[in-house]
Image (cartoon, rainbow, N blue to C red):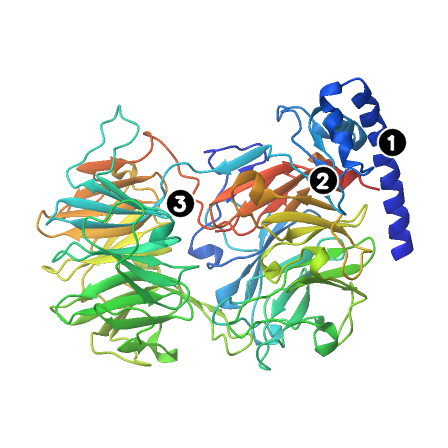
Amino acid sequence: MAYARLAKENTVPVRILEGQKTLISRTMHSMEYDAVRDELVVNSPLVQSILTFKGGSNGEVPPVRVIQGPKTQIQGTDYDGNDKMAIDPVNGEIFIGSATSAGPGKGVVLVFDRMANGDVAPKRILGGPKTQFDFPTPKGQGFPHMTVDPVRNLLIVSTRGGLLIFDRAASGDVSPKRVIKGPKTLLTAGNGGGLIKVYSPNGMIVSSCTEGSICAWHIDDVGDVAPRFKIPVQKLTGVNFSGPTLNPLHKEVIVTSSSRNVIATFYWPEIFETP
Amino acid sequence: MRAKSAGRSAIFAGILAIAFGVFSWSLLTTPDLSVRQSTGSARLVSIEQLPDYADVCAPEEMSAIAALHAEFEHNTSVYAADTVEVNRPPVRTIRDTYPIYSSVAVDPVRNEVVLQDTNLFSIKVFNRLENTPANVDASTPKRVIIGPDTKNEYNNGLYVDLANGETYSVAMDTADAIFTFRAGAEGNTEPMRVLDIPHRGFQVTIDEERQELYSTNQYPPRLLVFRKGASGNEKPLRVIEGQRTGLADVHGVAVDSQRKLVFVGNWGNSSNYKVAGSGKHLPPSITIYSTDANGDAAPLRTIQGPKTQLNWMGAFSLDPETGNLWVANDVGNSILVFRGTDNGDVAPMKVIKGETTRLDHPAGISIDTKNKEVWVSNMGNSSATAYSLTAAGNAAPIRTIRSAPVGWKSLKFGKPQVVAYDSKREEYLVPN
């Protein structure tokens, strides 16, 4: 569903993408807009696929590309499917967390070319003990959110209670360049659930943190460091939000509450203006 | 890297120090704020609410320094900490303040229509003969089951036991349970019974003849059959599951006790989570089994193909007198009626569809054989509409229960977990 940026309470969506022909299935825990190609990318978790739609698609329209099939190696779990993905519009790559036949805690990040279509192999696979990946959980949850900083050429992957920072093109079993993790970070074990976004011009990373808040760290932060900024969203609104995503033009941070069916927009210029 | 970061921190700290200087100067001329000096801190760590500004004003024209200065002059609390806490409320929120009705059950014994509100997490019970007048914004329910003790959230499937008035509710996501509420339950009341079910339940129905409860599980696709009255982590009596079943992204279910048949709705999204890259998009289908089916049982028949018009179908309801299957065809904005004997690529024997019907994303359906009516819950307009069982085509409802003004279009929220921003169109993109 698409809502106007200035939509407020009880403002109906301007577009809805729905129906069998869309190939969308339930439990989408990520969705990305590719501003470079004006496309919408979403994973279809129950069918191990990644769907790409034309920007502005409305109604029951099919995707323009579908990544799906045995060569893709995309694998979910009984609980979460493969429910999270991310796109790097600058370098034209799609990232998706995937389970493996090795079982819990042995998940990998598969990287596809943005223009891949059909049954294609990933161009890179990042995973192994050095990566510190710890998904999926034995219950089949905890697939990571990911984001790319194309300016610094870095990939950020959430882990339970931390952020793993890799070279963008890291492949195989490699260690993260840095890890932001520890009690001071305010990152919690549940942080697999919140989107991660990075504002590349200044390197600020925004994601959810403890007590229903949204926090911001710097991409150069390392170890057990406090966030630079924090919006105590739950304290302010009474609602526990996830999200967030960024609107740099208007210096806004947008968050959603899956627990109360609400979308909220915060004006947060500090994130975008901090040198 | 850390040194570079520290440098940036130092620059920012400098900016804050300048701002704090402005703040301190203002304290000298603002005696009522002087108490804040007692903290003794030289660091800004909390920013309170900004003055309201209209959305049409371009907030980006205000620099961070100016914003900080404005905040110092209005509401700033200072204490020692490492993190700047920004305490501005959201500038906008999008939410639907009306119910979104995902399911319906009619109780002709107590003359009630029960509606499952998946937006505000409640169950609303109306008089069966309620018909919201055009000049009234919303009908008032007889009673509402709502509150934290109900544990009822992401509530979808609904079933009312006509013998005792108990209401079964499927909490399909976080609770992963079927809650049973006693007859006449109201307010913040605990369920009298809780049955644990796997993640992604959808519809519940009961074979009253065999005293068995059917629960659909979207993914991994399966149909679970429990003893009626089962609770806790009691195991199902039977589970229909496996490659031969034809189950794929399971939704609706209906049981024909008389003819000993079970009908199951499949959206067609198929994969074996244990096998990488096994996903397939299949056409939607209705698979039909014997009530004795168990395990990896092949369906007796399958209704599937373009003639069926199936499109993200929701709940099922079966007319026990005719054996016809009534389908709430959500994105098709229609009610489809199939013969219980249909097989293959068949057109429905009857379709209720069109502007006069006031159908808008019908997801729930319930047949009232006593009064020869069928009730439908509309996710798209916060209403339930009733039709004669003989209705067809572009038929007007015989009664409508509205919980929002005439013409209202729902926001159609359903657990918006994430959001993307379409910078070209200035739109928020939200999955359900």
Q: Secondary structure at mark 2?
A: helix
Q: Dot 3, how many residues are within 10 Å of its Cα: few (below 14), some (14-19), or many (20+)?
A: many
**Which of disc 1 and disc 3 is earlier in sequence?**
1
Check the residue under mark 3 and report the chain it is in: B
Q: Which residue is mark 1?
A: B18
Q: Secondary structure at mark 1?
A: helix
Residue B28 is situated, as x and y percent measured from the top left of the image, at: 82, 20
Q: Secondary structure at mark 3?
A: loop
Could you tell me which residue is drawn at 86 percent across and 46 percent down? B9
Check the residue under mark 1 and report the chain it is in: B
Q: Camera-side residue: B38 or A266?
A: B38
In the image, taking residue A168 as reference, residue A100 lies left or right, namely left
Same chain for the residues under marks 1 and 2 in the image:
no
Residue B105 is situated, as x and y percent measured from the top left of the image, at: 22, 51
Q: Camera-side residue: A152 or B70?
A: B70
The tag on residue B119 is 3
Q: Dot 1, how many residues are within 10 Å of its Cα: few (below 14), some (14-19), or many (20+)?
A: some
Same chain for the residues under marks 3 and 1 in the image:
yes
Task: Indicate the amino acid at tag 2.
Answer: Pro
Relative height, residue B409 to residue B190 (above, below): above
Task: Indicate the amino acid at tag 3.
Answer: Asn
Judged by depth in the image, the label closer to the viewer, 1 or 2, is: 1
Q: Camera-side residue: B7 or B349?
A: B7
C-alpha span from label 1 to label 2: 25 Å
Relative height, residue A14 to residue B54 (above, below): below
Residue B95 is situated, as x and y percent measured from the top left of the image, at: 47, 38
Judged by depth in the image, the label closer to the viewer, 3 or 2, is: 3
Quick one: quadrant of the N terminus of chain B?
bottom right
Q: Which residue is mark 2?
A: A248
In the image, taking residue A43 as reference, residue B238 lies left or right, namely left
